[in-house]
Structure formats: C-alpha cells, structure tokens
Amino acid sequence: MAATGINRSEGIQFAVIAAIGVLAAILHFGHANDVLVFVVCGIAVAGMAHVLGVATEQAGEAAGPRVSALLNATFGNAAELIIVVLAIRQGGELIDVARYSIIGSVIGNVLLILGASLLVSGLRNGRQGFNATIAGVNATMLLLATAALALPTLFSSLGGISVSDTFDLSHGVAIVMALLYVAYLVHAFRSPDESGASHGTARWSPRLALLVLALSAIATGFLSEFLVTSIEPTIESTGISPVFIGLIVVPLVGNIAEHFAAVKIAAKGDLDFSMGIAFNSALQVALAVTAVAVAAGFVFGHELALSFGALEIAVLVAAALLAAFIAISGKATWLEGLELLAIYAIAALAFWYV
C-alpha cells in the first residue's frame, strides 16, 4: 500500500490540537489565571499525546514489528514521563505529584482502560475469549511490579527505619525494575506477534512519520513544562490535593490517547490487542517510568522515595489481583468491565477526599 500522507480527518485533528497548544503558550507567557493555564495545558498535552500515538503507530507500521515495538515502548507513555521528570526537577509539592502519578497510571490502565475495553467489547460483541497465555504472562509481570512498588512502603512503615534507608531501597528497586523491563522487552521481541495488529500498511512515509514524531515530542515537552509550572498555584487556588492530581489528573492527561485507542479496538472485537495496550502501558509505567523517576530524583537532588499511603497500595493490589483473575479465565463479559470501572470510580472518590 503506497503512502498517502496525512488524511483530511487527521489534518483537522492536528490543526485543532496545534491551536490549543498555541493558546496554552499564550496563556502561560501572558501570566493568565493559573487554573485556566492548568486546564488548557492539560487538554493540549492530552492532544499532543494523541499525535504522538498516531505518529508512533505510523512509524512502526513503516518500519516493521520489531521497530514498532521499540517505538511504542519508548513513546507509549512519553507525555506522562515528561511530566513526571519535570515535576521532580521542580521539587517541592510536585515530588508528591510525580510519585503518586506512577501508581495512578498503573491503576488507570488496569481499572479504567481495561474496564472500559471489556465493557464496550462485551456490550457490542457479547462474551469474548482472548489469549489467556499472553494475558497471564502480562498479569504475572504486573503482580510482580505491584509487589516491588509495595515493598518500600512496607519497609518505611517499620519502626526505626531512616529516610536515607528508604531512599537507598528505592534506588535498588528502581535498578531491578529497569533490568526487569529490559528483560520484558527482550521477551516481547523474541515472541511471535499475536496482537492482531497489521504491519507494512503505513499511510505515511517513514520520513513524515519521524518528522511528526519529533515535532510532537518537542511540543509535548514545552506544553508539559507549562502544565507543571501551573500545578502548585492550582493546588493553592483550588485546594485540590497533590495526591488527587498525581493519582487521577496526570495519568488521564498522559494516557487519554491510549484510553481511546484501546476502547476503539475493543469495540471492533480485537480484545487481545486492546488488553495488550492496557497491560503493556501499565507495565511500562510500573517498570520503566518508575526507574526513570527515581533516577531523575537522584540527578536533580530531589530524592523520590517509592513510599506510598496504605490506601494507594490497597487499590493498586486490588487492581492487579482483579486483572490477574480476569486474565487467567480466558474470557470476559461486559459485567467484569463494569466492575473494574466501579472500583476505579470508588478509588477516585476516595482519593479526592485524601
């Protein structure tokens, strides 16, 4: 199939997103109301995450499955990773936002994305089967990552534990997570592609895909900077806690493009591919983003401890266990998706009052 370039629908979408990005920059440099800047920048970053996703897909389709996997692993959570690193660099209350966004993204992928995908798929296609072997491997890896994130919290809750010890344990966990993520990528590259995604059918040329990828990544960096600088003033103006912004708002902004993509694919009946998006995105954050966040804290002198509250850990463990139970069954209904969404809604409500 010959490359046809950006189609009319994409062109309109990209133009609207670019206009919102320009508006966000004007509001930022014009010292507009911080809450307004926060909202517009959040919408702009979410839009750029969509552009990144489309460009990554097209670059991968043009290059083949292995490069596609590498690109998706690199840019799948690019917007959220940039926000986390910038928040850590700024320090202060934003360290909490960065730390909680790690757990928030994992919870969002497992409960919100997976739940919405199962709900839509079940309503449109009835009870569906999926590859329990692949889903089971992903669920097992997620349980392992959940345990790794929970252990520093349990460790810091012990009596007589110093803050420096908690930081040192977090460094060690981050190193193990990074190595595990490399192993996960090696396993993914060596395994046959059973996602149902087609390759070699790119509509864009490789040069166009890489150009859009580079430009959208740069724009995401600038817009994320504007967003991060408006978070603390927004917290002061609205009283919204850093916990809620980190657990709910930042993951939604960074992952909304993946949310829509997974649900759209699930509606078409490709539940394996949709579940793969949810699990892979959660694992990227739990393993790779965690490692980068801890490293960024060390580099910027704003140490980030992988220590969370009991409520956050409880929701994380519940999400991982529910996902594992669904994964090993090999079949799912819309009711199971609704159950996951219900847990997410209850958790979001609880986080609002933290």
Image (cartoon, rainbow, N blue to C red):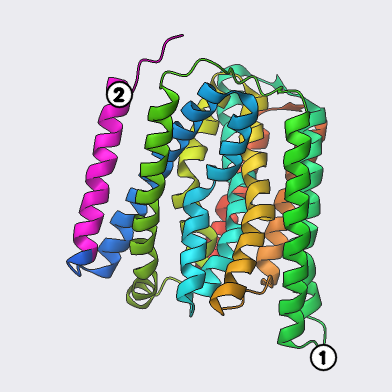
* Badge 2: residue crowd in 10 Å (few <14, some 14–19, many ≥20): few
* Badge 1: residue crowd in 10 Å (few <14, some 14–19, many ≥20): few
Which quadrant of the view contains residue 63? Answer: top right
Horizontal relation, residue 18 to residue 136: left or right: left
Return the x and y of residue 344 as percentages of the image width and height: 59, 51
Q: Report the amino acid beneath label 2.
A: Ser
Main secondary structure type of the part rendered in magenta: helix
Horizontal relation, residue 50 to residue 226: left or right: right
At a point 32% along the width and 27% down the height, the residue shown is 10
Residue with the mark numbered 2: 9
Return the x and y of residue 173 as percentages of the image width and height: 76, 65
Q: Helix, strand, or loop for circle 1? A: loop
Return the x and y of residue 118 as percentages of the image width and height: 62, 31
Horizontal relation, residue 115 to residue 163: left or right: left
At a point 53% along the width and 43% down the height, the residue shown is 75
In the rendered view, would you say 73 is above or below 37?
above
Residue with the mark numbered 1: 160
> Magenta region: which residues?
1-28
Of 30 and 58, the residue lying toward us? 58
Q: Helix, strand, or loop for circle 2? A: helix
Q: Report the amino acid beneath label 1.
A: Gly
Return the x and y of residue 137 as percentages of the image width and height: 81, 37
Extreme residue in the top direction: 1
At a point 40% along the width and 22% down the height, the residue shown is 204
153 magenta-colored: no
Q: CA distance from mark 2 to mark 1?
A: 60 Å
